[in-house]
């Protein structure tokens, strides 16, 4: 069994956050660009630190 720290990682094309290889992406890892379905739907680059789950300070 592999340690999680030994798995490959990528940066999300939308939010820029790093994400780790998953078994369901085994055959398609080269084509995976987004960390989540939400980022995939949002599409292209949004700039660093703009992950949809983070809250923005209104002031």
Image (tube, rainbow, N blue to C red):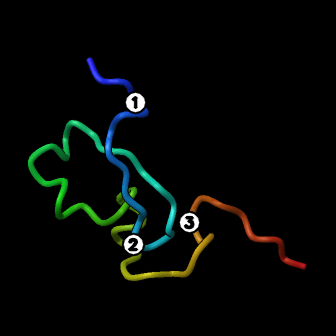
Instruction: Pinpoint residue 40: horizontal percent, then vertical percent.
Output: 34, 68
Quick one: which residue is furthest to the left in this view?
27
Circle on res. 13: 2
Q: Spatial distance from mark 3 to mark 2, Cα to Cα?
A: 13 Å
Front residue of 53/29: it is: 29
Quick one: which residue is furthest to the right in this view?
59
Front residue of 20/37: it is: 20
Q: Earlier in the sequence, mark 3 or mark 1?
A: 1
Badge 1 density bin: few <14, some 14–19, many ≥20, Cα 10 Å: few
Q: Are marks 3 and 1 in contact (CB under 8 Å)?
A: no
Q: Earlier in the sequence, mark 3 or mark 2?
A: 2
Q: Are marks 2 and 1 in contact (CB under 8 Å)?
A: no
Q: Secondary structure at mark 3?
A: loop
Q: Earlier in the sequence, mark 2 or mark 1?
A: 1
Badge 3 density bin: few <14, some 14–19, many ≥20, Cα 10 Å: some
Q: Tell me if 40 is positioned left or right of 31 in this view.
A: right
Q: Is residue 11 above or below residue 23?
A: below
Q: Tell me if 53 is positioned left or right of 43 in this view.
A: right
Q: Residue at x 42, y 51 (%)?
A: 19
Q: Tell me if 23 is positioned left or right of 18 in this view.
A: left
- If the image is split into quadrants, where does the N terminus sit? top left
Instruction: Pinpoint residue 7: horizontal percent, then vertical percent.
Output: 33, 38
- If the image is split into quadrants, where does the C terminus sit? bottom right
Q: Quadrant of residue 37?
A: bottom left
Residue matched to label 1: 4
Q: Residue at x 35, y 63 (%)?
A: 34
Q: Residue at x 42, y 63 (%)?
A: 11
Residue matched to label 3: 52
Q: Residue at x 15, y 43 (%)?
A: 26
Q: Spatial distance from mark 3 to mark 1, Cα to Cα?
A: 24 Å
């Amino acid at each position: 069994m592999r340690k999680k720290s030994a798995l490959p990682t990528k940066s999300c094309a939308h939010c820029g956050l790093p994400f780790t290889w998953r078994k369901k992406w085994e055959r398609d890892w080269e084509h995976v660009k987004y960390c989540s379905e939400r980022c995939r739907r949002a599409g292209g680059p949004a700039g660093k630190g703009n992950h949809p789950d983070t809250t923005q300070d209104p002031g």
